[in-house]
Amino acid sequence: MFKKYKRYILLGIPLLLLLAIGVYNIPAVNSRLAWRIDDARARVKYYFNPPAEAVFQPSGATNLTIETAILTARAEIFLTLTPQFTAIPETPTPGPTATPTATFPPAPPAVNLPGVTYVDQHSRWNYCGPANLTMALNFWGWKGDRDTVAKVIKPGSGDMRKNFIDRGLPDKNVMPYELVDFVNDETEYRALMRYGGDENLLKRLIAAGFPVIVEKGYYEHDTTGKITWMGHYLFTTGYDDTKGSFIAQDSYLKDKYGNPAGKNILSNYKTYQEGWRAFNYIFMVVYPADRESELYDVLGPWLDAEWANQHALEMANKETTTITGDDLFFAWFNKGTSHVALKQYVDAANAYDQAFSLYAKWDTKEKDRPYRMMWYQTGPYFAYYYSARYADVISLANTTLNDTISTPTLEESLLWRGRAFYMAGKTQLAVDDYRAALAIHTNWTPAVQALQDLGLQP
């Protein structure tokens, strides 16, 4: 009798598993469980392989043989790079000395712009970018919402069996250039971004009526209880010198009951700058076309992107000699980012080498390494790729995709690893990475173009 029941049990287990899989794939069920399974997977992986312990070690070796030089020349013709930086390397020339060419009257001691509508990022996946851009556009009268933005810049997997929110789960980040491109291509408004901003410039912009989006880092407790670092956009709409703080709209914050709590928060000037440093003091301004000349006057020398890049480099150079402790990593990383923006790729690669060396020595007693850094910034890929250091591109992408995130869902890292694979003569691996990038961000132009240039369709 026992053997009979045992046989039924053994037969029933596969049937139950098949039934469970079938139920899980029902869209209504999947939408409820997918994030829980993803969260559980992340917790398990991070427990056994803490992402903050992952360290990339650049080799410094170039792969520029005669064969790869020929491939490089061909690649420069057809590779369409993400528009965060200029695609084709040029022989670097000394940049202009970033000395301001105009003086401005001091900003008033306090400004708090009216007409700000707070938008949070809750009940969505990785919606910091869409939420902040929506606030910036709504300030000027735009009628769209955060989903309007996300459907263009963060469309997700393209799996139409899932609802729109769940399709966006794998895409962990929206880059600054994607926010700027949305405004310029999809609305009647305009936007620009620059590196090398400072406190006085932000005050001057706000005082003139132009709120600012910055990208910055800050620390919080993660799912394991440790203090961890993350990147975040922050819509800055005022300041108060008597309180020594900017006034900002933080789309991420919740109160203890889970309600939005980021409206009109005060961010201490020093804390604000320390977080802003992690992203080379980047800022974005959204504005109506009929106020463009006014904005240009307020920007002063920052209107010239080349000047701003050179200014950011000078700021980074200064900070590499004045900052101590863990934050020195960010200063050297910024130096690399500024060199990339100036198309000085070998200098950039050397600066990033120093940054990653400091990263390996990070003091982890109080807080984890900022292991999400490469989720948000791609400068090292540009630098190593255009210095013919393809092995370092692949190694950095492998570390980022395999060791810093629970599943390899970072389209920029996949794209750059694919490009490096192609340069190494591994075309099929390149194709696989391009397709993997499109599974995260459907119809993403750089990956589509990379496939089409190989004579393939997405």
Image (tube, grey):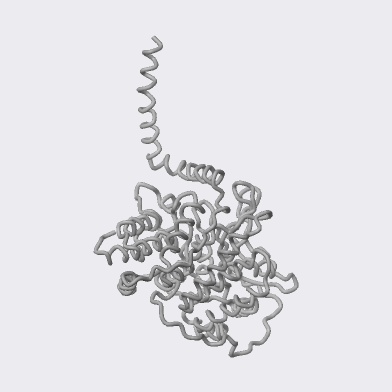
Q: Residue at x 64, y 47 (%)?
A: 225
Does residue 66 sit above or below 220 in this rendering?
A: below
Residue lying at the far top in this picture: please name it.
Answer: 1
Drawn side of residue 205 relative to residue 404, left or right: right
Image location of residue 286, percent across then percent down:
51, 74
Query: Which residue corresponds to the image point at 31% horizontal and 62% vertical from the top-left?
Result: 425
Q: Residue at (70%, 72%) from the top-left corner?
A: 240
- In the image, is 428 to the left or to the right of 244? left
Q: Nearer the viewer, residue 198 or 187?
A: 198
Count of marks overlaid on the render: 0
Instruction: Name the quarter where the N terminus is drawn.
Output: top left
Q: Is residue 422 left or right of residue 230?
A: left
Residue found at the far left of this picture = 455
Tell me which corner region of the image, top left, top right, bottom left or bottom right, holds residue 107. Answer: bottom right
Q: Position of residue 74 (x, y in %)?
A: 30, 73
Q: Quadrant of the C terminus?
A: bottom left
Residue 417 lies, with reference to residue 14, above or below; the image says below
**Is 22 situated left or right of 55 in this image?**
left
Pick the residue in front: 23 or 64. Answer: 64
- Residue at 61 percent across and 79 percent down: it is 201
- Counting from the top left corner in percent of width and height, residue 59 is at 48, 64
Between 224 and 101, the one nearer to me in the picture: 224
Which residue extends farthest right? 242
Residue 273 pos. (x, y %)? 65, 70
